[in-house]
Image (cartoon, rainbow, N blue to C red):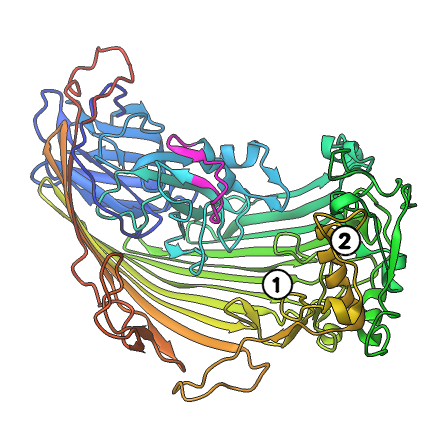
Amino acid sequence: MKRILCVTVLLIASIAGLAQGTTSRISGVATDASGAIVSNAVITATNDDTAVTYSTKTSAAGTYSFDSLQIGRYTLRAEAPGFRQFVSTGNVLAIGVPTSIDPKFEVGATTESVQVQGGYDLVQTESSGNFGAVIDNVTLTQLPIVATRGRSPLALTQYTPGVVQNNSANAPGGDIVVNGSRDRAFNYVLDGIDDNETSSGGSNNSPSHQNPDMLTEFRVITSNPTAEFGRNSGAQILMVTRSGTNHFHGNLFEFYQSPFLQANTAAAKSIGRPRPQFVQNIYGGSLGGPIWRDKAFFFANLELLHALTGTPVTRTVYTAAARNGQFRYVTSPNGALKNGNAASPVTSTTAPSVDASGNPIVPVTTYDIAANDPFHVGLDASTKAFLALTPLPNNFTVGDGLNTAGYNFTAPANDRQVDTTYKIDYVFNQKNALFGRISTGHQNTFNDVVNGGLQPFPGLLGTVNTFRQPRNMAINYRFSPTKSLTNELVVGFNRFGYAFVNPGFATAVTQPFTMNNLITNPLSAFVGNNRYLTTIQYVDNLTFVKGAHIIKGGFNLRNGREIDHRGSIGTLNAIPQVNFSASSNPVNTTQYKTPVSSSSCTSCISSTDQVTLNSAINDMLGRIGSVTAGYVSQSNLSAFKPAGTINNMDSRWDEYDFYIQDTWHATPNLVIDFGLRDDARLAPKFQGFPSLVPNQDMRYGTPLTTALQFVPGKFMNDRWNNLGPSIGFAWDPFKSVLSLPACSRACRA
């Protein structure tokens, strides 16, 4: 029977740990009309959708518990000799939220019954912690959550108390924070299995890409987790996939977005561009039902996404005259006035040098780069061909107007996603139940704008295509050998591979040039990076009911692995890159007869334009500034591997979590939680390359004692004593007063 009026008092909850599963519990205390304990009463819980039934008896203290139950609606029936049956219907069991149903027996024949209508526990009195919110299926499927890359139910976490959009300029993890924690401190669990991007996790970012139709619900725990839950200091997101029932249910859906349905943006209007191009088509469906009524059920979900995004971009290119070696500049007394584009403000040092079409509107002087080459080689054929891949400018409001200008166009990007989920549930009998679920798919982006992969210019290939391949599997086995003992075993894995591929690498590798003067390179010799993340997981939860105590303990063992194939060696590329830096290879003013700037000249070039000229000379004549490349060392650190060798890394780590907690029904209206958790973290292991650490203390303020060297060693010591105790209680002082009006006041401390 539900009680809306209660007082919950919390003393502190546990430190971080990992959520152990995605089931929940129904428990309570059986009493008669006088408040006396009723022991040995038969309690039966039936899932309304699947007709799966579980049975137990109350202990000597009148308590009972059904642990590790799948979420859903349940009918609870209680029977005891000399009393009418107690029947509570429509009780909603939510993920991570124990439901309290306290049978209240009345004297009478067992053929008679007392009917009570249940529902959600509006105020939680069965647990002292795990504050947050439950996002149920109605909310998931009815609220508009279509974003620019599919439908993300995780966006609803932002409406949970304590969760805010931080709007920080330095937030690489998504900028969603929980009670002041880092935006990377989120932990995602799908059917009890880790669903995190383990190399660089973040808020609103789970690799397997859930959609509203595949989830029954999910729970957000934002603070005060009990010993069973935790791991991260931010939100714990516990997600449960849907299951089939005794009835067939399915749906088909399609969501379509197109520019003609949207208004133009102010940014596009300001520069005379049409509305941004964004076309998105999301479609798919779900189907679930019985394989064998009351025994076996299936569920399948498919979502596909095709999206086209047009991003207005402005590139910087050389003008036609500059490409032919004709560098133009304005002169002025003391070199005070520099070249100005069509949008330059009129000041003592700047003024427009060209009109909107790029025609000079002031007298200009021309320096012939080829004619002044002291070696008489002429314009370099390789750089000339490289620059010929870039179009002529169409925007003279950027650059210096005379030698560099802009090129505007709309760069396309394409998203192609397929996400599938399949689940089978099988109930052997009251003591044994099993389900298996696998989620798989691919999420590919061509010309990935987020990772700087848009095509440099029309007609050229993009620089980054991103390929993502998530895989997540869970197998859950529930075993209840006795009325007072239940065990839940979950095994599975989470695998996420993604590759940043340069589609134009084969062409670009022959011309790995980086031009000066902020010119956009038409080709990129970026090798690309691949990463493969795997977490294999073993979870076990054991629940034992003894008198007024519900004792629960378990472990969560995670074996993680990350394999990297990186063309980026630190900040350098594995393929040698050629630049034409005038700082590394200065232009000799006397040899090249370049104009000079002077603070006392009658009419000369500005110092700014002189720097631009020197850089253009190196570009046009192919005067190499430097060649840079990243090199990978041999595993014994004796030498470097050949140029072009990519960096292959293989790291592995183990995380072991253990917990035990006691939920003690000290009285019918007082629950006390005791818990202890140990989060063991073992030092990472590296395959194929050494783990190097400083040979002395490097903490800030600590002076060096000897020459600093990096020597083989562990990054950290194995940590087996990360203990976190917890204690709390929930108290309902008016539980036996049936005539009090409902209210929602609570006191927490």
Q: Which element type, helix, strand or loop, lies under badge 1?
A: strand
707 or 373, which lies in front? 373
Q: Residue 437: x and y, percent?
A: 46, 58
Which is more foreground, mark 1 or mark 2?
2
Under mark 2, the amino acid is Thr
Disc 2 crowd, CA 10 A, few/some/many (<14, 14-19, 20+): many
| Direction from residue 442 to residue 580 in the image, left or right | right
Q: Earlier in the sequence, mark 1 or mark 2?
A: 2
Residue 564, position in %: x, y? 49, 71
Q: Residue at x 52, y 57 (%)?
A: 422
Residue 390 visible in the snapshot: yes
Dots 1, 2 in contact, CB < 8 A: no
Task: Write down the region rendered in magenta.
Answer: 160-176
Q: Up-down: is 186 above or below 26? A: below
Give the labeled residue for mark 1: 467
Q: Which mark is residue 316?
A: 2
Residue 245 falls within the magenta-colored stretch? no
Between 703 and 280, the residue placed more toward the observer is: 703
Work out which quarter of the rendered image holds the N terminus and state it.
top left
Identify the residue at image location x=50%, y=41%.
169
From the viewer's perspective, is 550 left or right of 633?
A: left
Find residue 203 and report its horizontal and vertical position in percent: 46, 45
Task: Where is residue 428? Give x, y as percent.
Answer: 35, 58
Amino acid type of disc 1?
A: Phe
Mark 2 secondary-structure assignment? strand
